[in-house]
Amino acid sequence: MKFELTILGSGSAVPTSKRNSAAQVLNILERYFLIDCAEATQHQLRRFHIPYNKINHIFISHLHGDHYFGLMGLLSSLSMQNRRGEMHIYADERLQKIIEGQLQIMKTRFTYPLFFHYLSRKEERIYEDRSVTVTAFPLLHRKDAPVCGFLFQEKERERTVLKKEAEAWKVPIAFMQYLKKGADFISPEGEIVSNSRLTVSPPPARSYAYMTDTLFRERFADVVRGVDLLYHEATYGKELEAVAKENFHSTAEQAACIACLAGVKKLLLGHFSARYPDPTCLLAEARAIFPNTFICTDGDTFEIPALKRNT
Amino acid sequence: MKFELTILGSGSAVPTSKRNSAAQVLNILERYFLIDCAEATQHQLRRFHIPYNKINHIFISHLHGDHYFGLMGLLSSLSMQNRRGEMHIYADERLQKIIEGQLQIMKTRFTYPLFFHYLSRKEERIYEDRSVTVTAFPLLHRKDAPVCGFLFQEKERERTVLKKEAEAWKVPIAFMQYLKKGADFISPEGEIVSNSRLTVSPPPARSYAYMTDTLFRERFADVVRGVDLLYHEATYGKELEAVAKENFHSTAEQAACIACLAGVKKLLLGHFSARYPDPTCLLAEARAIFPNTFICTDGDTFEIPALKRNT
Protein backbone atom coordinates (compact mmCIF):
# COMPACT_ATOMS: atom_id res chain seq x y z
CA MET A 1 0.00 0.00 0.00
CA LYS A 2 3.02 2.27 -0.49
CA PHE A 3 2.81 5.72 -1.99
CA GLU A 4 6.26 7.13 -1.46
CA LEU A 5 8.33 9.79 -3.18
CA THR A 6 12.14 9.77 -3.05
CA ILE A 7 14.00 12.90 -4.06
CA LEU A 8 17.04 12.04 -6.19
CA GLY A 9 17.93 15.61 -7.13
CA SER A 10 16.75 18.84 -5.51
CA GLY A 11 19.03 21.30 -7.28
CA SER A 12 18.63 23.19 -10.53
CA ALA A 13 20.61 23.51 -13.76
CA VAL A 14 24.15 23.02 -12.46
CA PRO A 15 24.56 20.25 -9.88
CA THR A 16 26.36 21.16 -6.66
CA SER A 17 28.21 18.95 -4.21
CA LYS A 18 25.03 18.73 -2.11
CA ARG A 19 22.21 18.76 -4.64
CA ASN A 20 21.99 16.87 -7.88
CA SER A 21 19.79 18.15 -10.70
CA ALA A 22 16.19 17.04 -11.21
CA ALA A 23 15.07 13.46 -10.65
CA GLN A 24 12.62 11.72 -8.36
CA VAL A 25 11.21 8.26 -8.03
CA LEU A 26 7.63 7.62 -7.00
CA ASN A 27 6.75 4.20 -5.62
CA ILE A 28 3.03 3.55 -5.88
CA LEU A 29 2.18 0.03 -4.74
CA GLU A 30 5.62 -1.22 -5.87
CA ARG A 31 5.33 0.41 -9.27
CA TYR A 32 8.41 2.64 -9.61
CA PHE A 33 7.87 5.77 -11.70
CA LEU A 34 10.95 7.84 -12.50
CA ILE A 35 10.27 11.54 -12.95
CA ASP A 36 13.02 13.43 -14.78
CA CYS A 37 16.50 12.00 -15.09
CA ALA A 38 19.38 14.44 -14.68
CA GLU A 39 22.97 13.34 -15.15
CA ALA A 40 24.02 10.94 -12.35
CA THR A 41 20.46 9.85 -11.63
CA GLN A 42 21.63 6.24 -11.86
CA HIS A 43 24.24 7.09 -9.21
CA GLN A 44 21.54 8.53 -6.95
CA LEU A 45 19.28 5.53 -7.49
CA ARG A 46 22.10 3.30 -6.27
CA ARG A 47 23.02 5.64 -3.44
CA PHE A 48 19.48 5.64 -2.08
CA HIS A 49 18.96 1.91 -2.63
CA ILE A 50 16.12 2.18 -5.13
CA PRO A 51 15.69 -1.09 -7.07
CA TYR A 52 15.97 0.74 -10.36
CA ASN A 53 15.55 -2.33 -12.49
CA LYS A 54 11.91 -2.12 -11.36
CA ILE A 55 11.44 1.20 -13.15
CA ASN A 56 9.30 0.63 -16.24
CA HIS A 57 8.04 4.17 -16.86
CA ILE A 58 10.08 7.35 -17.10
CA PHE A 59 8.48 10.79 -17.32
CA ILE A 60 10.63 13.65 -18.64
CA SER A 61 9.15 17.09 -18.00
CA HIS A 62 11.15 18.91 -20.68
CA LEU A 63 14.35 18.74 -22.67
CA HIS A 64 16.77 20.82 -20.70
CA GLY A 65 19.88 18.85 -19.85
CA ASP A 66 19.37 19.03 -16.10
CA HIS A 67 16.20 16.98 -16.60
CA TYR A 68 17.37 14.26 -19.01
CA PHE A 69 21.18 14.01 -19.38
CA GLY A 70 21.21 10.93 -17.14
CA LEU A 71 18.78 9.00 -19.30
CA MET A 72 21.27 7.52 -21.76
CA GLY A 73 23.48 6.30 -18.91
CA LEU A 74 20.60 4.74 -17.00
CA LEU A 75 19.17 3.03 -20.08
CA SER A 76 22.64 1.72 -21.00
CA SER A 77 23.31 0.38 -17.52
CA LEU A 78 20.00 -1.47 -17.60
CA SER A 79 20.98 -2.93 -20.94
CA MET A 80 24.37 -4.03 -19.60
CA GLN A 81 22.45 -5.82 -16.86
CA ASN A 82 20.54 -7.67 -19.58
CA ARG A 83 17.16 -6.18 -18.82
CA ARG A 84 14.44 -7.75 -20.95
CA GLY A 85 11.27 -5.96 -19.83
CA GLU A 86 9.73 -3.05 -21.73
CA MET A 87 10.73 0.50 -20.85
CA HIS A 88 8.32 3.35 -21.56
CA ILE A 89 9.42 6.96 -21.84
CA TYR A 90 6.97 9.86 -21.80
CA ALA A 91 8.60 12.97 -23.20
CA ASP A 92 8.97 15.61 -25.87
CA GLU A 93 9.21 13.69 -29.15
CA ARG A 94 12.71 15.03 -29.80
CA LEU A 95 14.01 12.83 -27.00
CA GLN A 96 13.46 9.78 -29.17
CA LYS A 97 15.69 11.32 -31.84
CA ILE A 98 18.36 12.10 -29.25
CA ILE A 99 18.40 8.60 -27.77
CA GLU A 100 17.90 6.62 -30.95
CA GLY A 101 20.25 8.90 -32.85
CA GLN A 102 23.05 7.89 -30.50
CA LEU A 103 22.17 4.22 -30.80
CA GLN A 104 22.22 4.49 -34.59
CA ILE A 105 25.56 6.31 -34.67
CA MET A 106 27.02 3.65 -32.41
CA LYS A 107 25.25 0.87 -34.34
CA THR A 108 23.99 -0.62 -31.13
CA ARG A 109 20.68 -1.33 -29.40
CA PHE A 110 19.43 -2.07 -25.93
CA THR A 111 18.62 -5.57 -24.72
CA TYR A 112 15.00 -4.53 -24.08
CA PRO A 113 12.21 -2.82 -26.03
CA LEU A 114 12.07 0.94 -25.59
CA PHE A 115 8.82 2.79 -26.27
CA PHE A 116 8.47 6.54 -26.58
CA HIS A 117 5.19 8.26 -25.82
CA TYR A 118 5.08 11.86 -26.96
CA LEU A 119 3.74 14.57 -24.71
CA SER A 120 1.29 16.88 -26.43
CA ARG A 121 0.69 20.48 -25.46
CA LYS A 122 -2.60 19.75 -23.76
CA GLU A 123 -3.76 18.14 -20.55
CA GLU A 124 -4.12 14.40 -21.13
CA ARG A 125 -4.00 11.06 -19.45
CA ILE A 126 -0.74 9.46 -20.55
CA TYR A 127 -0.69 6.34 -18.39
CA GLU A 128 -3.24 4.08 -16.79
CA ASP A 129 -3.20 0.70 -15.13
CA ARG A 130 -5.46 -1.10 -12.68
CA SER A 131 -4.52 1.17 -9.78
CA VAL A 132 -2.87 4.32 -11.07
CA THR A 133 -3.34 7.06 -13.65
CA VAL A 134 -0.83 9.67 -14.77
CA THR A 135 -1.93 12.93 -16.36
CA ALA A 136 0.42 15.32 -18.13
CA PHE A 137 -0.45 19.01 -18.22
CA PRO A 138 1.30 21.96 -19.84
CA LEU A 139 3.31 24.46 -17.81
CA LEU A 140 5.18 27.48 -19.13
CA HIS A 141 8.95 27.53 -19.58
CA ARG A 142 11.37 28.62 -22.30
CA LYS A 143 10.19 28.25 -25.87
CA ASP A 144 12.95 25.79 -26.79
CA ALA A 145 11.68 23.30 -24.23
CA PRO A 146 7.91 22.97 -23.78
CA VAL A 147 7.34 21.61 -20.31
CA CYS A 148 4.73 19.37 -18.71
CA GLY A 149 3.74 18.80 -15.14
CA PHE A 150 2.65 15.30 -14.08
CA LEU A 151 -0.22 14.26 -11.84
CA PHE A 152 -0.11 10.77 -10.36
CA GLN A 153 -3.39 9.49 -8.95
CA GLU A 154 -4.39 6.27 -7.31
CA LYS A 155 -7.69 4.99 -8.57
CA GLU A 156 -10.57 4.73 -6.11
CA ARG A 157 -10.50 1.18 -4.84
CA GLU A 158 -13.53 -1.07 -4.28
CA ARG A 159 -15.12 -1.30 -0.85
CA THR A 160 -13.53 -3.70 1.62
CA VAL A 161 -15.74 -6.64 2.61
CA LEU A 162 -16.04 -7.34 6.36
CA LYS A 163 -15.42 -11.07 6.29
CA LYS A 164 -17.11 -11.97 9.55
CA GLU A 165 -20.25 -10.05 8.70
CA ALA A 166 -20.40 -11.54 5.23
CA GLU A 167 -19.99 -15.03 6.65
CA ALA A 168 -22.66 -14.42 9.27
CA TRP A 169 -25.09 -13.44 6.51
CA LYS A 170 -23.88 -16.33 4.36
CA VAL A 171 -23.16 -14.07 1.38
CA PRO A 172 -22.24 -16.36 -1.57
CA ILE A 173 -18.73 -15.97 -3.01
CA ALA A 174 -20.23 -15.06 -6.38
CA PHE A 175 -21.95 -12.05 -4.83
CA MET A 176 -18.76 -10.59 -3.34
CA GLN A 177 -17.92 -8.57 -6.46
CA TYR A 178 -21.27 -6.77 -6.15
CA LEU A 179 -20.75 -6.14 -2.45
CA LYS A 180 -17.39 -4.51 -3.27
CA LYS A 181 -19.15 -2.20 -5.69
CA GLY A 182 -21.65 -1.11 -3.02
CA ALA A 183 -24.68 -3.35 -3.65
CA ASP A 184 -26.97 -4.32 -0.77
CA PHE A 185 -27.41 -8.04 -0.10
CA ILE A 186 -30.77 -9.79 -0.05
CA SER A 187 -30.70 -12.91 2.08
CA PRO A 188 -32.41 -16.18 1.00
CA GLU A 189 -35.09 -15.22 3.55
CA GLY A 190 -35.69 -11.97 1.65
CA GLU A 191 -34.10 -9.67 4.24
CA ILE A 192 -32.30 -6.62 2.81
CA VAL A 193 -28.87 -6.23 4.38
CA SER A 194 -27.50 -2.77 3.72
CA ASN A 195 -24.07 -2.71 2.07
CA SER A 196 -22.72 -0.49 4.85
CA ARG A 197 -23.23 -3.37 7.34
CA LEU A 198 -21.11 -5.70 5.19
CA THR A 199 -18.31 -3.46 3.90
CA VAL A 200 -16.23 -0.44 4.74
CA SER A 201 -15.00 2.30 2.44
CA PRO A 202 -11.57 1.77 0.91
CA PRO A 203 -8.69 4.06 1.93
CA PRO A 204 -8.97 7.36 0.06
CA ALA A 205 -7.13 7.44 -3.27
CA ARG A 206 -3.84 9.31 -2.98
CA SER A 207 -2.31 11.79 -5.40
CA TYR A 208 0.97 13.53 -6.16
CA ALA A 209 1.76 16.36 -8.59
CA TYR A 210 5.12 17.46 -10.02
CA MET A 211 5.54 21.00 -11.35
CA THR A 212 8.93 22.16 -12.67
CA ASP A 213 10.26 24.25 -14.50
CA THR A 214 7.62 26.92 -14.87
CA LEU A 215 6.56 30.51 -14.68
CA PHE A 216 3.82 31.24 -12.17
CA ARG A 217 0.32 31.24 -13.59
CA GLU A 218 -2.74 31.00 -11.33
CA ARG A 219 -4.47 28.67 -13.74
CA PHE A 220 -1.88 25.96 -13.13
CA ALA A 221 -3.56 25.40 -9.76
CA ASP A 222 -6.66 23.98 -11.45
CA VAL A 223 -5.12 20.68 -12.51
CA VAL A 224 -3.57 19.84 -9.16
CA ARG A 225 -6.54 20.79 -7.02
CA GLY A 226 -6.62 18.98 -3.70
CA VAL A 227 -3.64 16.69 -4.25
CA ASP A 228 -2.07 15.14 -1.19
CA LEU A 229 1.42 16.20 -2.15
CA LEU A 230 2.67 18.84 -4.55
CA TYR A 231 6.30 19.28 -5.60
CA HIS A 232 6.81 22.73 -7.04
CA GLU A 233 10.02 24.38 -8.18
CA ALA A 234 11.27 27.31 -6.11
CA THR A 235 14.38 28.25 -8.01
CA TYR A 236 14.52 31.73 -6.49
CA GLY A 237 13.37 33.78 -3.52
CA LYS A 238 10.91 36.63 -3.94
CA GLU A 239 13.79 39.14 -3.88
CA LEU A 240 14.67 37.74 -7.31
CA GLU A 241 11.14 37.62 -8.73
CA ALA A 242 12.24 39.61 -11.77
CA VAL A 243 15.09 37.18 -12.42
CA ALA A 244 12.69 34.27 -11.96
CA LYS A 245 10.39 35.78 -14.58
CA GLU A 246 13.25 36.45 -16.96
CA ASN A 247 14.43 32.84 -16.62
CA PHE A 248 10.92 31.37 -16.77
CA HIS A 249 11.08 30.08 -13.21
CA SER A 250 9.08 30.52 -10.01
CA THR A 251 9.85 31.91 -6.58
CA ALA A 252 9.16 30.05 -3.33
CA GLU A 253 6.29 32.47 -2.69
CA GLN A 254 4.74 31.68 -6.05
CA ALA A 255 5.01 27.95 -5.37
CA ALA A 256 3.17 28.51 -2.10
CA CYS A 257 0.50 30.53 -3.94
CA ILE A 258 -0.14 27.59 -6.26
CA ALA A 259 -0.41 25.26 -3.22
CA CYS A 260 -2.87 27.65 -1.59
CA LEU A 261 -4.96 28.21 -4.69
CA ALA A 262 -5.10 24.47 -5.37
CA GLY A 263 -5.84 23.57 -1.76
CA VAL A 264 -3.20 20.86 -1.71
CA LYS A 265 -2.40 19.09 1.55
CA LYS A 266 1.38 19.39 1.55
CA LEU A 267 3.93 21.32 -0.51
CA LEU A 268 7.52 20.35 -1.31
CA LEU A 269 10.00 22.89 -2.63
CA GLY A 270 12.98 22.04 -4.84
CA HIS A 271 15.01 22.97 -7.93
CA PHE A 272 16.90 25.53 -5.87
CA SER A 273 19.35 27.82 -7.59
CA ALA A 274 22.95 27.11 -6.51
CA ARG A 275 22.96 30.57 -4.94
CA TYR A 276 20.92 29.13 -2.05
CA PRO A 277 23.22 26.55 -0.42
CA ASP A 278 20.84 26.78 2.54
CA PRO A 279 17.29 27.27 1.25
CA THR A 280 15.81 28.01 4.72
CA CYS A 281 14.93 31.53 3.54
CA LEU A 282 12.89 30.01 0.71
CA LEU A 283 11.08 27.77 3.17
CA ALA A 284 10.19 30.72 5.42
CA GLU A 285 8.92 32.68 2.44
CA ALA A 286 6.64 29.84 1.35
CA ARG A 287 5.42 28.98 4.87
CA ALA A 288 4.24 32.55 5.36
CA ILE A 289 1.65 31.73 2.70
CA PHE A 290 1.31 27.95 2.92
CA PRO A 291 2.43 26.63 6.32
CA ASN A 292 2.56 22.92 5.41
CA THR A 293 5.63 23.38 3.20
CA PHE A 294 8.86 21.40 3.28
CA ILE A 295 12.29 21.68 1.69
CA CYS A 296 13.56 18.79 -0.42
CA THR A 297 17.07 17.42 0.05
CA ASP A 298 18.56 14.63 -2.05
CA GLY A 299 17.59 11.31 -0.52
CA ASP A 300 14.51 12.60 1.31
CA THR A 301 11.46 10.39 1.20
CA PHE A 302 7.90 11.60 1.61
CA GLU A 303 5.22 9.02 2.17
CA ILE A 304 1.50 9.47 1.83
CA PRO A 305 0.11 6.86 4.21
CA ALA A 306 -3.00 4.91 3.24
CA LEU A 307 -5.65 6.23 5.63
CA LYS A 308 -8.39 3.90 6.80
CA ARG A 309 -11.89 5.15 6.21
CA ASN A 310 -14.36 3.27 8.39
CA THR A 311 -17.64 4.38 6.89
CA MET B 1 56.19 22.74 -12.17
CA LYS B 2 53.24 20.46 -11.47
CA PHE B 3 52.70 17.15 -13.17
CA GLU B 4 49.80 15.66 -11.27
CA LEU B 5 47.15 13.10 -12.10
CA THR B 6 43.78 13.05 -10.31
CA ILE B 7 41.61 9.98 -10.62
CA LEU B 8 37.95 10.93 -11.13
CA GLY B 9 36.69 7.44 -11.84
CA SER B 10 38.41 4.12 -11.15
CA GLY B 11 35.54 1.76 -11.90
CA SER B 12 34.42 0.12 -15.12
CA ALA B 13 31.22 0.01 -17.16
CA VAL B 14 28.63 0.33 -14.42
CA PRO B 15 29.44 2.91 -11.71
CA THR B 16 29.25 1.72 -8.11
CA SER B 17 28.71 3.69 -4.93
CA LYS B 18 32.49 3.81 -4.45
CA ARG B 19 33.90 4.02 -7.97
CA ASN B 20 32.68 6.15 -10.82
CA SER B 21 33.40 5.14 -14.40
CA ALA B 22 36.42 6.35 -16.36
CA ALA B 23 37.74 9.89 -16.08
CA GLN B 24 40.98 11.50 -14.98
CA VAL B 25 42.45 14.95 -15.06
CA LEU B 26 46.14 15.57 -15.67
CA ASN B 27 47.59 18.88 -14.56
CA ILE B 28 50.84 19.62 -16.38
CA LEU B 29 52.16 23.05 -15.46
CA GLU B 30 48.60 24.32 -14.86
CA ARG B 31 47.32 22.96 -18.14
CA TYR B 32 44.38 20.71 -17.26
CA PHE B 33 43.86 17.76 -19.61
CA LEU B 34 40.71 15.71 -19.13
CA ILE B 35 41.06 12.07 -20.11
CA ASP B 36 37.75 10.28 -20.68
CA CYS B 37 34.52 11.66 -19.31
CA ALA B 38 32.07 9.13 -17.86
CA GLU B 39 28.67 10.21 -16.61
CA ALA B 40 29.01 12.38 -13.47
CA THR B 41 32.54 13.47 -14.31
CA GLN B 42 31.45 17.08 -13.73
CA HIS B 43 30.27 15.98 -10.28
CA GLN B 44 33.66 14.42 -9.55
CA LEU B 45 35.52 17.50 -10.81
CA ARG B 46 33.58 19.59 -8.30
CA ARG B 47 33.95 17.02 -5.54
CA PHE B 48 37.72 16.97 -5.88
CA HIS B 49 38.01 20.74 -6.33
CA ILE B 50 39.44 20.70 -9.84
CA PRO B 51 39.03 24.12 -11.52
CA TYR B 52 37.28 22.54 -14.47
CA ASN B 53 36.79 25.79 -16.33
CA LYS B 54 40.55 25.53 -16.95
CA ILE B 55 40.11 22.37 -19.00
CA ASN B 56 40.67 23.20 -22.67
CA HIS B 57 41.46 19.76 -24.03
CA ILE B 58 39.47 16.56 -23.60
CA PHE B 59 40.73 13.17 -24.76
CA ILE B 60 38.19 10.38 -25.20
CA SER B 61 39.74 6.94 -25.54
CA HIS B 62 36.72 5.31 -27.20
CA LEU B 63 32.97 5.57 -27.55
CA HIS B 64 31.64 3.28 -24.87
CA GLY B 65 29.28 5.14 -22.60
CA ASP B 66 31.38 4.67 -19.48
CA HIS B 67 34.03 6.81 -21.17
CA TYR B 68 31.97 9.68 -22.61
CA PHE B 69 28.39 9.90 -21.24
CA GLY B 70 29.41 12.80 -18.99
CA LEU B 71 30.67 14.93 -21.85
CA MET B 72 27.37 16.55 -22.84
CA GLY B 73 26.68 17.52 -19.22
CA LEU B 74 30.13 18.97 -18.66
CA LEU B 75 30.07 20.94 -21.92
CA SER B 76 26.58 22.24 -21.10
CA SER B 77 27.54 23.31 -17.60
CA LEU B 78 30.51 25.22 -19.00
CA SER B 79 28.17 26.91 -21.44
CA MET B 80 25.76 27.85 -18.66
CA GLN B 81 28.71 29.46 -16.93
CA ASN B 82 29.27 31.55 -20.06
CA ARG B 83 32.59 30.06 -20.99
CA ARG B 84 34.13 31.82 -23.98
CA GLY B 85 37.43 30.01 -24.51
CA GLU B 86 37.92 27.29 -27.08
CA MET B 87 37.35 23.66 -26.14
CA HIS B 88 39.15 20.91 -28.04
CA ILE B 89 37.98 17.31 -28.09
CA TYR B 90 40.14 14.45 -29.36
CA ALA B 91 37.99 11.44 -30.12
CA ASP B 92 36.44 9.00 -32.55
CA GLU B 93 34.81 11.16 -35.22
CA ARG B 94 31.37 9.81 -34.36
CA LEU B 95 31.47 11.77 -31.12
CA GLN B 96 31.06 14.98 -33.08
CA LYS B 97 27.86 13.61 -34.60
CA ILE B 98 26.59 12.59 -31.16
CA ILE B 99 27.27 15.97 -29.54
CA GLU B 100 26.35 18.21 -32.45
CA GLY B 101 23.36 16.03 -33.30
CA GLN B 102 21.90 16.80 -29.89
CA LEU B 103 22.62 20.51 -30.26
CA GLN B 104 20.88 20.52 -33.64
CA ILE B 105 17.83 18.65 -32.39
CA MET B 106 17.57 21.12 -29.50
CA LYS B 107 18.35 24.06 -31.83
CA THR B 108 20.93 25.34 -29.40
CA ARG B 109 24.68 25.95 -29.24
CA PHE B 110 27.35 26.45 -26.65
CA THR B 111 28.68 29.86 -25.66
CA TYR B 112 32.18 28.85 -26.76
CA PRO B 113 33.79 27.34 -29.85
CA LEU B 114 34.05 23.56 -29.81
CA PHE B 115 36.63 21.81 -31.99
CA PHE B 116 36.75 18.10 -32.71
CA HIS B 117 40.00 16.39 -33.62
CA TYR B 118 39.51 12.90 -34.95
CA LEU B 119 41.67 10.04 -33.73
CA SER B 120 43.04 7.92 -36.52
CA ARG B 121 43.94 4.28 -36.18
CA LYS B 122 47.67 4.91 -36.08
CA GLU B 123 50.15 6.31 -33.60
CA GLU B 124 50.29 10.08 -34.00
CA ARG B 125 51.00 13.30 -32.18
CA ILE B 126 47.60 14.92 -31.62
CA TYR B 127 48.56 17.86 -29.41
CA GLU B 128 51.61 20.04 -28.94
CA ASP B 129 52.36 23.27 -27.19
CA ARG B 130 55.53 24.93 -25.85
CA SER B 131 55.91 22.42 -23.03
CA VAL B 132 53.79 19.34 -23.68
CA THR B 133 53.03 16.81 -26.41
CA VAL B 134 50.25 14.26 -26.51
CA THR B 135 50.46 11.15 -28.65
CA ALA B 136 47.53 8.85 -29.38
CA PHE B 137 48.20 5.21 -30.10
CA PRO B 138 45.86 2.36 -31.01
CA LEU B 139 44.90 -0.32 -28.51
CA LEU B 140 42.59 -3.26 -29.09
CA HIS B 141 39.01 -3.35 -27.83
CA ARG B 142 35.61 -4.27 -29.27
CA LYS B 143 35.08 -3.60 -32.95
CA ASP B 144 32.27 -1.11 -32.36
CA ALA B 145 34.57 1.18 -30.46
CA PRO B 146 38.16 1.52 -31.70
CA VAL B 147 40.24 2.63 -28.74
CA CYS B 148 43.34 4.78 -28.31
CA GLY B 149 45.81 5.13 -25.49
CA PHE B 150 47.33 8.54 -24.78
CA LEU B 151 50.90 9.44 -23.97
CA PHE B 152 51.52 12.82 -22.33
CA GLN B 153 55.10 14.03 -22.42
CA GLU B 154 56.79 17.14 -21.16
CA LYS B 155 59.25 18.56 -23.64
CA GLU B 156 62.90 18.65 -22.70
CA ARG B 157 63.53 22.07 -21.26
CA GLU B 158 66.56 24.27 -21.89
CA ARG B 159 69.52 24.18 -19.52
CA THR B 160 69.27 26.33 -16.41
CA VAL B 161 71.82 29.17 -16.23
CA LEU B 162 73.75 29.50 -12.95
CA LYS B 163 73.31 33.23 -12.44
CA LYS B 164 76.29 33.81 -10.19
CA GLU B 165 78.67 32.00 -12.51
CA ALA B 166 77.33 33.80 -15.54
CA GLU B 167 77.73 37.15 -13.79
CA ALA B 168 81.23 36.32 -12.68
CA TRP B 169 82.17 35.58 -16.30
CA LYS B 170 80.23 38.67 -17.48
CA VAL B 171 78.20 36.66 -20.00
CA PRO B 172 76.17 39.19 -22.03
CA ILE B 173 72.37 38.94 -21.79
CA ALA B 174 72.20 38.36 -25.53
CA PHE B 175 74.29 35.19 -25.18
CA MET B 176 72.04 33.63 -22.55
CA GLN B 177 69.82 31.92 -25.14
CA TYR B 178 72.87 30.08 -26.50
CA LEU B 179 74.01 29.12 -23.00
CA LYS B 180 70.58 27.59 -22.39
CA LYS B 181 70.99 25.53 -25.54
CA GLY B 182 74.38 24.22 -24.33
CA ALA B 183 76.92 26.49 -26.05
CA ASP B 184 80.26 27.17 -24.40
CA PHE B 185 81.11 30.81 -23.69
CA ILE B 186 84.22 32.54 -24.99
CA SER B 187 85.19 35.45 -22.78
CA PRO B 188 86.38 38.79 -24.21
CA GLU B 189 89.85 37.61 -23.18
CA GLY B 190 89.45 34.57 -25.43
CA GLU B 191 89.06 32.04 -22.64
CA ILE B 192 86.71 29.14 -23.39
CA VAL B 193 84.31 28.60 -20.50
CA SER B 194 82.66 25.21 -20.76
CA ASN B 195 78.87 25.30 -20.73
CA SER B 196 78.79 22.86 -17.85
CA ARG B 197 80.43 25.49 -15.61
CA LEU B 198 77.69 28.01 -16.39
CA THR B 199 74.52 25.88 -16.50
CA VAL B 200 72.91 22.80 -15.08
CA SER B 201 70.69 20.31 -16.82
CA PRO B 202 66.96 21.00 -16.62
CA PRO B 203 64.77 18.65 -14.61
CA PRO B 204 64.12 15.53 -16.66
CA ALA B 205 61.00 15.69 -18.83
CA ARG B 206 58.14 13.76 -17.27
CA SER B 207 55.67 11.46 -18.94
CA TYR B 208 52.35 9.72 -18.31
CA ALA B 209 50.52 7.08 -20.34
CA TYR B 210 46.86 6.05 -20.22
CA MET B 211 45.83 2.61 -21.47
CA THR B 212 42.19 1.48 -21.25
CA ASP B 213 40.16 -0.47 -22.46
CA THR B 214 42.30 -3.05 -24.16
CA LEU B 215 43.27 -6.62 -24.72
CA PHE B 216 46.82 -7.51 -23.75
CA ARG B 217 49.33 -7.35 -26.59
CA GLU B 218 53.06 -7.24 -25.90
CA ARG B 219 53.61 -4.71 -28.66
CA PHE B 220 51.61 -2.08 -26.74
CA ALA B 221 54.60 -1.74 -24.42
CA ASP B 222 56.67 -0.16 -27.20
CA VAL B 223 54.88 3.19 -27.21
CA VAL B 224 54.98 3.73 -23.47
CA ARG B 225 58.58 2.68 -22.95
CA GLY B 226 60.16 4.24 -19.86
CA VAL B 227 57.26 6.50 -18.88
CA ASP B 228 57.26 7.78 -15.31
CA LEU B 229 53.68 6.75 -14.72
CA LEU B 230 51.45 4.27 -16.53
CA TYR B 231 47.72 3.85 -15.89
CA HIS B 232 46.57 0.51 -17.22
CA GLU B 233 43.17 -1.09 -16.94
CA ALA B 234 42.91 -4.19 -14.77
CA THR B 235 39.25 -5.04 -15.15
CA TYR B 236 39.75 -8.63 -14.00
CA GLY B 237 42.05 -10.87 -12.00
CA LYS B 238 44.01 -13.65 -13.68
CA GLU B 239 41.43 -16.21 -12.53
CA LEU B 240 39.15 -14.56 -15.11
CA GLU B 241 41.69 -14.27 -17.91
CA ALA B 242 39.33 -16.04 -20.32
CA VAL B 243 36.51 -13.61 -19.45
CA ALA B 244 38.91 -10.70 -19.87
CA LYS B 245 39.80 -11.96 -23.33
CA GLU B 246 36.18 -12.51 -24.25
CA ASN B 247 35.34 -8.95 -23.18
CA PHE B 248 38.45 -7.42 -24.76
CA HIS B 249 39.89 -6.40 -21.40
CA SER B 250 43.09 -7.05 -19.45
CA THR B 251 43.89 -8.72 -16.16
CA ALA B 252 45.98 -7.10 -13.43
CA GLU B 253 48.78 -9.50 -14.30
CA GLN B 254 48.70 -8.44 -17.92
CA ALA B 255 48.80 -4.78 -16.91
CA ALA B 256 51.91 -5.55 -14.86
CA CYS B 257 53.45 -7.36 -17.83
CA ILE B 258 53.05 -4.25 -19.96
CA ALA B 259 54.66 -2.17 -17.19
CA CYS B 260 57.56 -4.63 -17.00
CA LEU B 261 58.06 -4.92 -20.73
CA ALA B 262 57.94 -1.15 -21.12
CA GLY B 263 60.24 -0.52 -18.16
CA VAL B 264 57.93 2.15 -16.73
CA LYS B 265 58.68 3.65 -13.32
CA LYS B 266 55.29 3.28 -11.68
CA LEU B 267 52.06 1.48 -12.54
CA LEU B 268 48.51 2.45 -11.60
CA LEU B 269 45.66 -0.02 -11.88
CA GLY B 270 42.03 0.94 -12.47
CA HIS B 271 38.83 0.19 -14.40
CA PHE B 272 38.01 -2.55 -11.93
CA SER B 273 35.01 -4.74 -12.54
CA ALA B 274 32.28 -4.16 -9.93
CA ARG B 275 32.91 -7.75 -8.79
CA TYR B 276 36.04 -6.48 -6.99
CA PRO B 277 34.74 -4.08 -4.33
CA ASP B 278 38.17 -4.50 -2.76
CA PRO B 279 40.79 -4.83 -5.51
CA THR B 280 43.62 -5.78 -3.15
CA CYS B 281 43.82 -9.18 -4.84
CA LEU B 282 44.42 -7.42 -8.16
CA LEU B 283 47.17 -5.35 -6.58
CA ALA B 284 48.90 -8.43 -5.21
CA GLU B 285 48.68 -10.14 -8.57
CA ALA B 286 50.30 -7.20 -10.34
CA ARG B 287 52.96 -6.60 -7.67
CA ALA B 288 54.17 -10.16 -8.03
CA ILE B 289 55.33 -9.10 -11.48
CA PHE B 290 55.81 -5.35 -11.14
CA PRO B 291 56.32 -4.30 -7.50
CA ASN B 292 55.88 -0.55 -7.95
CA THR B 293 52.16 -0.89 -8.63
CA PHE B 294 49.32 1.02 -6.99
CA ILE B 295 45.54 0.82 -6.91
CA CYS B 296 43.51 3.84 -8.03
CA THR B 297 40.61 5.10 -5.95
CA ASP B 298 38.39 8.02 -6.96
CA GLY B 299 40.00 11.23 -5.76
CA ASP B 300 43.54 9.85 -5.57
CA THR B 301 46.28 12.12 -6.85
CA PHE B 302 49.62 10.93 -8.15
CA GLU B 303 52.32 13.50 -8.63
CA ILE B 304 55.49 13.13 -10.62
CA PRO B 305 57.84 15.56 -8.89
CA ALA B 306 60.26 17.63 -10.98
CA LEU B 307 63.63 16.13 -10.12
CA LYS B 308 66.64 18.38 -10.12
CA ARG B 309 69.50 17.17 -12.28
CA ASN B 310 72.74 18.85 -11.26
CA THR B 311 74.95 17.87 -14.13
Image (cartoon, coloured by chain):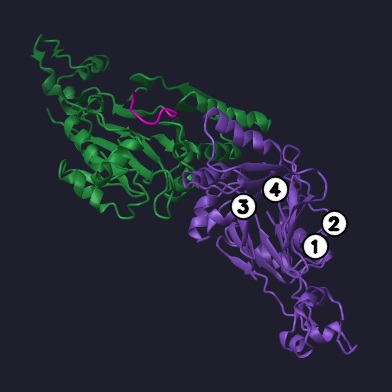
Chain colours: A green, B purple
Mark pair 4, 2: CA separation: 19 Å
Q: Are marks 4 and 1 in contact (CB under 8 Å)?
A: no
Say which chain tag 1 marks: B
Q: Nearer the viewer, mark 4 or mark 1?
A: 4
Q: Quadrant of the C terminus of chain B?
A: bottom right
Mark pair 4, 3: CA separation: 17 Å
Which is nearer the N-term, disc 4 or disc 1? Answer: 4
Q: Image quadrant of residue A105?
A: top right
Residue holding disc 2: B218
Residue A97, position as x, y percentages in the image: 56, 26
Say which chain tag 3 marks: B
Label 2 is placed on what type of residue? Glu
Q: Quadrant of the N terminus of chain B?
A: bottom right
Q: Nearer the viewer, mark 4 or mark 3?
A: 3
Residue holding disc 1: B257
Q: Are marks 1 and 2 in contact (CB under 8 Å)?
A: yes
Say which chain tag 4 marks: B
Mark pair 3, 1: CA separation: 33 Å
Magenta stretch mostly in which secondary structure?
Answer: loop
